[in-house]
Image: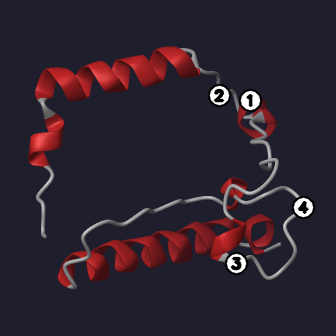
Amino acid sequence: MPNNTYPAEFIHDNLAIQTHIIHASYENKVKRLLFLGSSCIYPKHCPPPMKEEYLLTGLLEPTDVSRLKNLGWQAKISLEDGILETYNWFVKKQAWRMIKDVS
């Protein structure tokens, strides 16, 4: 797998791809962009090649954080608390007002 053999090149290429997609969407006045940055949103037993219509149609591939934990990472807060903190930040800052509607 390229992400195991060439991790720096793999992340570089993937970041470049996502950056170009987001920027091209902006330049072309895309009204709504759903950007999903992981194959984990496709069903676990998704037949190749993956197609957009397979999205969220079955059990999802679980996220394995054991590699991160082996490197010394540990969560500082629970997922639920993280979502609540993010929500509260958006409400306090009224961050949705910063999002430009290009319609």
Of label 1 and label 4, which has the lower sequence position? 4
Q: Residue at x 80, y 34 (%)?
A: 66
Mark 4 secondary-structure assignment: loop
Colour logic: secondary structure
Mark 2 secondary-structure assignment: loop
Mark 4 burial class by Cα count in 10 Å: few <14, some 14-19, many 20+? few
Q: Residue at x 33, y 24 (%)?
A: 87
Of label 1 and label 3, which has the lower sequence position? 3
Of label 4 and label 2, which has the lower sequence position? 4
Label 2 with label 1: CB-CB less than 8 Å = yes
Residue 12 visible here: yes
Circle on res. 51: 3
Q: Which residue is mark 1?
A: 69
Residue 85 position in % (x across, y down): 36, 18
Label 1 with label 4: CB-CB less than 8 Å = no
Residue 103 position in % (x across, y down): 13, 70
What is the CA distance from the residue labelled 1 to the residue labelled 3?
32 Å
**Kind of residue indicated by mark 1:** Lys
What is the CA distance from the residue labelled 4 to the residue labelled 2?
29 Å
Residue 10 position in % (x across, y down): 63, 72
Mark 3 secondary-structure assignment: loop
Q: Which residue is mark 4?
A: 45
Of circles 2 and 3, which is in front?
A: 3
The part of the image, by quadrant, that contains residue 39 is: bottom right
Of label 4 and label 3, which has the lower sequence position? 4
**Kind of residue indicated by mark 4:** His
Mark 1 secondary-structure assignment: helix
Of circles 4 and 2, which is in front?
A: 4
**Kind of residue indicated by mark 3:** Lys
Label 1 with label 3: CB-CB less than 8 Å = no
**Kind of residue indicated by mark 2:** Trp
